[in-house]
Amino acid sequence: MESFLGRYRNLIILVGVLFLQVLGLAVQVKTGANEEKDTRLIRVWALGAITPFERALVWVQNSTASVWHNYFYLRGVRAENRQLKEQIEQMRLQQVRLSEDAAQARRLQTLLSFKEQFISKTVAAQVIGTSGSDLSRIVTIDKGENAGIRRDMAVITADGIVGKVLFVSPNLAQVLLISDQSSGVGAILDKSRLQGVLRGTANGEVVLERVMSDEQVQPGDIVLTSGGDQIFPKGLPVGTVTRVGSGKDLFLSIRIKPAANLSRLEEVLVLTEKQERESVADDHVRIRAADILAQRLPSVPDKPATAVTPPAVAEGASPVPVGGNTAAKPAGTAAGNAAAVKSASGNTPAKSATLQVQPGKTAVQPSTQSSAQTSTAPKPKPLSKSSTEAKPDGAQSQPPAQPSIVEQKPAPVAAQPDTPPPSQDNSPQ
Amino acid sequence: MALIVQAYVPKYFPSFAVYVDLPLLVTIFFAMARRNPVAGLFTGAIIGLVQDMIGSREIGIYGIAKTVVGYGASSLGVKLDVENAGARLLVTLGFYLVHSAVYFAVARGLVNSTLHWNWGPGMLAGLVNSFLGVILYFILDRFKQRT
């Protein structure tokens, strides 16, 4: 160092002196055109001398941070990335599965939302005769083609199904009962939802066939129509299981007690028109047909009726009540209203037979309005005690929660119990 | 003394300031006479700074130029015999050009002056300073011998 200084001493001094003078110049000289606002040259030189070092330091800092973040830190990030990718794959698989489940749910929902047939129009008819033979379970009604009845139309009562129209003439029709050997009705068990075919036997009994022997069927189970035969709407009461036994092949032999008293039919309803409608969730309380009738039909006095006699029917002597025009039945009346069609008493005024669709099963049903008007029934009204009490014997066979067709309540009309029914067809309310 | 003359004579003879640079001649003479680079550069620095101070430009332009000339002249005086008139003529001419170049560089580079380089007047001024320098060196030698 000393040799260097000694060798170049003169030159070092020269450079030093020159540097000082240059510094002096830099203090005096200002950059830019405006000497008052511009920066002195020495400040520019000082900044120019310092900023490179600052730039270098920043560059080193950024490079170090970049190396850390892009390499060392990424080592943990790679593992995390791998885990995240695995999670993504699992979630994709799960998503696919859920998509399949969702698609299946949508398909099932579509299936469930199939249009069901509801009774939109009925024709009340009176049973005027039978076949007169045990081999043939047929009844004759007093309505025919002129009333809109056609072959293969379903025939029901307030208690349950009766049969189907077998033969039609202009003013008469024959109804094949479900107890006939040649009859076949699609049926379904209410609880287990087992489907089968309802057939009659030689001795007039009704059995449910095509139920596998390994299925659990208990006496007392309610049987409803399944709607599969395209004749009876779904959900109509058929009967109650009385006995379960083994049948031929691997099927059970289930004896059914029909809900409707087939041996004492007086008035029936012929379903002349059915309407397709999507099922609607109904959480209303199940209402029996008797209850609805109690709301519409005239009340039966508690005391034995002595003076009041039902007026004679103009045509066909059909004491049918019911249409909105004639049925001036105040709602809420009780006794004798429950079963629309009484098989017991011939003097019992024919009440409009209504079947109530079991809520939730076939959704609310509508029914016919007064005179030949098809109306869709609103939701059934809640039960009333009087109607419950007035339930006739015939209704005892009725299952506790019978699906029934809810008829639209006609406009309240002043009670005219003695008003003779009109000659026109009265659709049950 | 040279600075006073350099400042006073142009009052009557303006061309004197253009073509003659007495402080430079004095710097060259004393730098070559001392034969010490450090002494020579300080001599040139002081003369140059003072010359700047009496002027209106920034201080340090002449100082830097004459510092370089003083260092060079003293270094050259150590190695060469500059007693010869011819040698002095050439040395003076050379150092004048060096002085002009340094002055031009500093003025344009640091001060942002609009100075323009002209070879003709520059060479003429160099010759004038060289001849004048030879005469001045001879007179100064007489004073040196007497002292």
Image (cartoon, helix red, strand yellow):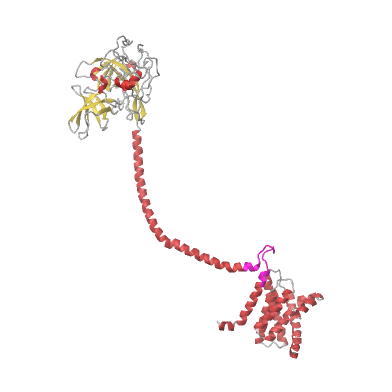
x and y, in percent, of residue B116 in the image: 71, 71
| In the rendered image, the vertical position of residue A186 relative to residue B81, given as above or below | above
Q: Residue furthest bottom?
A: B146
Judge left or right: residue A94 versus residue A196. Answer: right
Q: Which residues are magenta?
A: A24-45
Q: Residue at x 66, y 85 (%)?
A: B36
x and y, in percent, of residue A391 in the image: 29, 20
Please state which of residues B69 and A46 is positioned toward the viewer in this rendering. A46
**Quarter-of-image position of residue A342:** top left
Q: Residue furthest front?
A: A303
Q: Quadrant of the C terminus of chain A?
A: top left
x and y, in percent, of residue B39 in the image: 67, 83
Is A38 one of the magenta-colored residues?
A: yes
Please state which of residues B66 and A159 is positioned toward the viewer in this rendering. A159
Please state which of residues A229 and A158 is positioned toward the viewer in this rendering. A158
**Quarter-of-image position of residue A373:** top left
x and y, in percent, of residue A65 in the image: 47, 63
Residue B110 is at least partly visible in this image: no
| In the rendered image, the vertical position of residue A335 relative to residue B63, given as above or below | above
Q: Residue furthest top?
A: A307
| In the rendered image, the vertical position of residue A197 relative to residue A270, given as above or below | below
Q: Residue furthest right?
A: B12
